[in-house]
Amino acid sequence: MSQYLKHSILSDSHDLLMQQRDQNYTLDRLATDIKHSKKSIYKYFGSKISLIEEVFRTHREYVRLQFERIDSEHILEIDKLFKYIYLVDDSIKQIRLSRWYHQAKPYNKIKEHYFILRTEVYEPFLLKGLYRYEQKLAAYQITPESLADYVLSSIEHCYFQNNINDIKAEENNPHTDHLIFTLHGCLISLEDV
């Protein structure tokens, strides 16, 4: 029963924390919204920051599984790359990066968890999709690493520039659509070179 309760708290907290637009969302409000006592949250997670860190770890593992699912699909490699980029965009949108960074001021580990997500999940899959263009990109003095960093930084910047209250989960990010359109044209032209 206790593992079930812990999982229930984590699952409900994950959904609420990822969807919450209020930068000052308190543990009291969270406990009320998930219909669990603060005492139960503290029993299983010890502190608000521990709960937030566990939410981040859970999100990272979920995103990794999504990337692996795409990776196993029998589709063109270029299509996998663009699915990876859309998954990065969706993941960052769910995290509401600017809110997490706002909360991270007193808790540096939140930033660390994001960078683990970036370096251990986003980057390896983007690089996997870009390495097939490595020789052709080299002719233009571009490395897959620099292009992956550009894609990630560009998407991150877009979400930092937007007020978190203006970001709606159901909306596509026009910046990412434009980025993929441009990248698609460039990579397709490299295939013909």
Image (cartoon, rainbow, N blue to C red):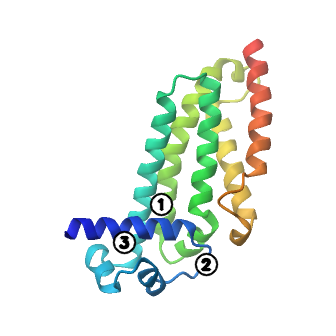
* Image spot of residue 141 (x, y percent): 73, 27
* Residue nearest the viewer, comparing 144 with 22: 22
Residue ID at (75%, 21%): 188
Which is closer to the viewer, label 1 or label 2?
2
- Which residue corresponds to mark 3? 50
Q: Is residue 37 left or right of residue 22?
A: left
Q: Which mark is residue 22?
A: 2
Quote the CA–CA distance across marks 1 and 3. 13 Å
Give me the disc on residue 145: none
Q: Residue at x 37, y 67 (%)?
A: 10
Tell me which amino acid carries mark 3.
Ser
User: Neighbour class for label 1 at 10 Å: few (<14), some, many (≥20)?
Assistant: few
| Residue drawn at the location 60% of the way across and 23% of the way down | 77
Labels 1 & 2 near each other (Cβ < 8 A): no
Across and down, in percent, residue 160 comes to 70, 63
Q: Which residue is the site of mark 1?
A: 112
Q: Quadrant of residue 40?
A: bottom left
For numbered disc 1, what is the local secondary structure? helix
Closer to the camera, 190 or 164?
A: 164
Give the distance between the C-alpha atoms of the residues marked 1 and 2, in whole angstroms: 22 Å
Of helix, strand and loop, which one carries label 3?
A: helix
Q: Looking at the picture, how far across and down is residue 89, in whole percent?
A: 64, 49
Find the residue positioned furthest to the top: 193
Query: Label 2 is placed on what type of residue?
Result: Asp
Q: Nearer the viewer's eye, disc 3 or disc 2?
A: 2
Camera-nearest residue between 169 and 108:
169
Relative to 124, does residue 63 appear above or below in the rendering?
Answer: below
Instruction: Looking at the picture, tell me which residue is in the foreground, 19 or 126.
Output: 19
| Count of marks placed on residues | 3
